[in-house]
């Protein structure tokens, strides 16, 4: 697949940079996008469309030829999808100095094939190239807005080693597809790292999170965000800290099996079984440094 470089989004990127500098928390809630993935199946010889939701976030790769803007999400969110719907915030380019925006539903046919999978097939990540989409809308005088993570938001070895075993974290996304419909805002969840982020959980480049994870949260960014002061291994630091720590992709559940029992049985046994998942509220996240492995696809 040919990846188109983005050449025309100075206004958008300046807006994102301004948000990051002046109000990083505002940057966080503008950095995600809701994804709907539709699949077609034949049920009783009839075609039925099934729709699922997930979370994506904006990211920009730096290459020798320029910057490549993408949406990051999980592979299982888009797998087998015949159509995808991305909910962008947009505004007319001529109104770029105002805060007015509307919600733009961008439809992508043959969605799963449009996405680029991670070079390691065991890693549940894909990227969705958005430069062609942004260029198409720009030709109509419409800017698709985004607050974008960049490669320097990924912690290097020196920063990772300086992290505490227990860090306060935030997850931004759309559990059960929930969002503020009027303002197109995501849901922010707060928790802590459940395993030390500087270690590889079960020898994989992953870590656990102690926070509620539900369907729709797949693809949510896991970030460390501190403003004012925060603890480090060597004491208290002052200032603002924003680290893209990882990407949520799964959770632990425990399934309990039983059966439906009528309130008044009259010795009638109901054999209908039910399976109830009980969440552990433990998320499993892929470390963000695995995003850099996508760059091999740009060669």
Image (cartoon, helix red, strand yellow):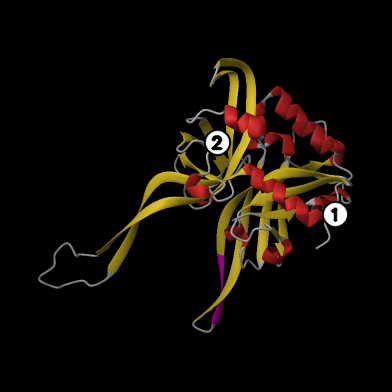
Tell me where residue 246 sits by quadrant: top right
Locate the N terminus by quadrant.
bottom right
Disc 2 to disc 1, C-alpha distance: 35 Å
Q: Residues within 10 Å of mark 1 (few under 14, many from 20)?
A: some
**Mark 2 or mark 1, earlier in chain:** 1
Task: Give the residue pinned by disc 2.
Answer: 198
Q: Can you see residue 131?
A: yes
Front tag of 2 and 1: 2
Residue at image coords 74%, 49%: 70
Q: In the image shown, does 90 or 207 lie closer to the viewer?
A: 207
Q: Is residue 47 magenta?
A: yes
Q: Is residue 88 magenta?
A: no
Q: Can you see residue 187?
A: no
Residue at image coords 61%, 64%: 79
Q: Residues within 10 Å of mark 2 (few under 14, many from 20)?
A: some
Secondary structure under the numbered disc 1 in the rendered image: loop
Residue at image coords 63%, 25%: 241
Is residue 166 depicted above or below 4 in this figure?
above
> Looking at the rendered structure, which numbered label has been put on residue 269?
none
Horizontal and vertical percent position of residue 140 = 87, 51
> Horizontally, is 218 left or right of 95 in the view?
left
> Horizontally, is 190 left or right of 121 in the view?
left
Which secondary structure class fits the magenta region best? strand
Is residue 16 depicted above or below 115 in this figure?
above
Tell me where residue 61 sits by quadrant: top right
Horizontal and vertical percent position of residue 31 = 67, 39
Question: In this picture, which residue range is highlighted in magenta?
Answer: 46-50
Horizontal and vertical percent position of residue 101 = 73, 39
Secondary structure under the numbered disc 2 in the rendered image: loop
Task: Give the residue pinned by disc 1.
Answer: 4
């Amino acid at each position: 697949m040919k990846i188109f470089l983005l050449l025309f989004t100075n206004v958008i990127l300046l807006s994102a940079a301004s948000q990051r500098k002046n109000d990083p928390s505002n940057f966080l809630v503008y950095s995600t996008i809701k994804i709907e993935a539709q699949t077609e199946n034949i049920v009783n010889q009839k075609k039925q469309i099934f729709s699922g939701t997930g979370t994506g976030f904006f990211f920009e790769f730096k290459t020798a030829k320029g910057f490549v803007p993408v949406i990051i999400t999980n592979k299982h969110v888009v797998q087998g999808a015949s159509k995808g719907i991305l909910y962008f915030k947009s505004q007319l380019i001529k109104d770029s100095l105002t805060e007015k925006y509307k919600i733009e539903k961008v439809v992508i046919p043959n969605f799963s094939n449009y996405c680029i999978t991670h070079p390691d097939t065991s890693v549940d990540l894909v990227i969705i190239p958005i430069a062609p989409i942004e260029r198409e809308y720009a030709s109509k005088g419409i800017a698709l807005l985004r607050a974008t993570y960049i490669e320097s938001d990924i912690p290097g070895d020196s920063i990772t080693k300086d992290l505490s075993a227990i860090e306060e974290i935030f997850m931004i996304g759309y559990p059960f597809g929930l969002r503020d419909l009027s303002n197109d805002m995501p849901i922010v969840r707060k928790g802590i790292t459940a395993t030390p982020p500087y270690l590889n959980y079960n020898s994989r480049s992953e870590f656990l999170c102690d926070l509620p994870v539900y369907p729709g949260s797949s693809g949510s960014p896991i970030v460390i965000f501190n403003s004012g002061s925060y603890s480090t291994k060597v004491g208290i630091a002052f200032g603002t800290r924003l680290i893209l720590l990882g990407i949520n992709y799964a959770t632990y559940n425990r399934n309990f099996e039983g059966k439906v029992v009528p309130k008044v049985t009259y010795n009638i046994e109901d054999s209908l079984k039910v399976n109830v998942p009980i969440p552990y509220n433990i998320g499993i996240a892929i470390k963000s440094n695995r995003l850099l492995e996508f760059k091999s696809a740009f060669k």
